Amino acid sequence: MPNFLAKNLKDIKLPVSLDGVEFIWEAINGDEKLVYTKALDCEFCLVVKNSGDKYVIKCDKLSRPANLKAIQKALIAYKDLFATDVISQAIALKESKNSSYNQYIISSDELLSRLDGCEYKSIFVEIGFGSGRHLLYQAKENPNTLIIGIEVYKPACMQVENLARINGLNNILLLNLDARLVMSLLKSNSIDRLFLHFPVPWTKSKMRRVVSEQFAMETKRILKDGGKFELRSDDREYSDYTISCFMDLQISNIQIYKNRFLEISSKYEDRWIRQNKDIYDVIYLFYGSSDELNLECEFEFDRPNLEQIKSNFTNKTIKNSDHFIHLERIYTLCDGSILLRVAFGSFYRPEHRYLIITKDSISYLFKKPLLTIENIKAHKNLEDMLRCVTL
């Protein structure tokens, strides 16, 4: 990640700008400060860390934009304005060799935007696509279908993105996210097929499994009338567990196969077949329709008591059955306002946000949280905490 080190920094009053980059204000906590920055239509913070004999300047991880060039441009401007005796730097502006290509790996926000204007006849989703053999096969065989791949392992996403580009497949979207988060964002009755091939069985830690009773209910909700969920696994116990979860639904139609031949196989399946292991298929078929979630929340706050929030703040975590809140750190602005760093929401995909708190208002900096059940609950708890000053 771009950064530079300097022995000294000039004391220049903000706001200030250079070469199209604006530095608006700064918020301080001990030996660290955040500099609110605008560059190339992006808004984010730079982190300035005093490490004793030097300063480390880089982009704040929490607010980091996807546009790497904006970060590089901001760091160069900050260096030229503030730094003296630069020790080292890794911020050279370079054109990305893939800048003219379609970007397959997208954020959850972009997924929602793409789905709102989706013109494909059908949508397939694959959870944990690994090497991408099955996902790429489905994309080739179904050019009028949008193929959404979800994978928590970033190198796998990058590998499949490259293969999709080489093969000219434009009906693929990839998300480097937890599948449970993505499923919670999908509309009811929107997915034609959902694939889960050779998931990690987590025999000794079943809470980490993709499949659960909640997963079965979410699968039922997002599938269209006639839609299918397909598990393919070499683990008999995991297959039995999946059957049990889906049989707990009020109405369930399930097909079970053993050693069924498919046109395409993953590298893991090839390995299991060479070892003469059995392969199990569990297919859940949904008929009917599901209600929409109808989630509503503006993610807004009442007028705060700024001084009480300042004096009562402590680093603390509050856990509930399906969500949590962690008050992490407080920064102070020169006008007396504060910046509060918080983490909250679901345990499997927490939100990390800054709250800007003035004497008149509280608001999320940069963007509001995703509209999920867990985030709504956490926001309401956070609102109560800030209103009642029980920090």
Image (cartoon, rainbow, N blue to C red):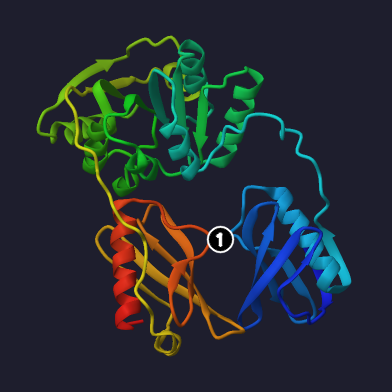
Whether residue 356 is visible, yes or no, is yes
Q: Amino acid at mark 1?
A: Leu
Give the position of the C terminus as an image quadrant. bottom left
x and y, in percent, of residue 181 in the image: 38, 45
Residue 187: give x, y in percent of width and height.
31, 36
Q: Which element is circle 1 on?
A: loop
**Residue 89: x %, y % from top left:** 83, 61
8, above or below 42, in the image: below
**Which residue has dot 1 on it?**
62
Residue 78 figure quarter? bottom right
Q: Tell me: residue 352, above or below residue 163.
A: below
Left or right of 346: which side holds 88?
right
- Find residue 283 and report its image quarter: top left
Q: Residue at x 70, y 68 (%)?
A: 23
Q: Nearer the viewer, residue 375 or 5?
A: 375
Q: Residue at x 75, y 38 (%)?
A: 96
**Camera-side residue of 277 and 139:** 139
> Residue placed at 67% from the left, 64% from the top?
37
Left or right: residue 81 compared with residue 177 = right
- In this picture, is 349 found above or below 387? above
Residue 233 in view of the camera: no
Q: Residues within 10 Å of mark 1 (few under 14, many from 20)?
A: few
Between residue 180 and residue 123, name the one nearer to us. Answer: 123
Asked whether, in this view, residue 20 is left or right of residue 371, the answer is: right
Q: Residue furthest right?
A: 85
- Check the image and name the residue furthest to the left: 250
The quarter of the rendered structure image containing the N terminus is bottom right
**Above-or-below relation of 6 to 228:** below
Residue 34 lies, in percent from the top left, at 63, 72
Q: Of 281 and 63, which appears nearest the observer?
A: 63
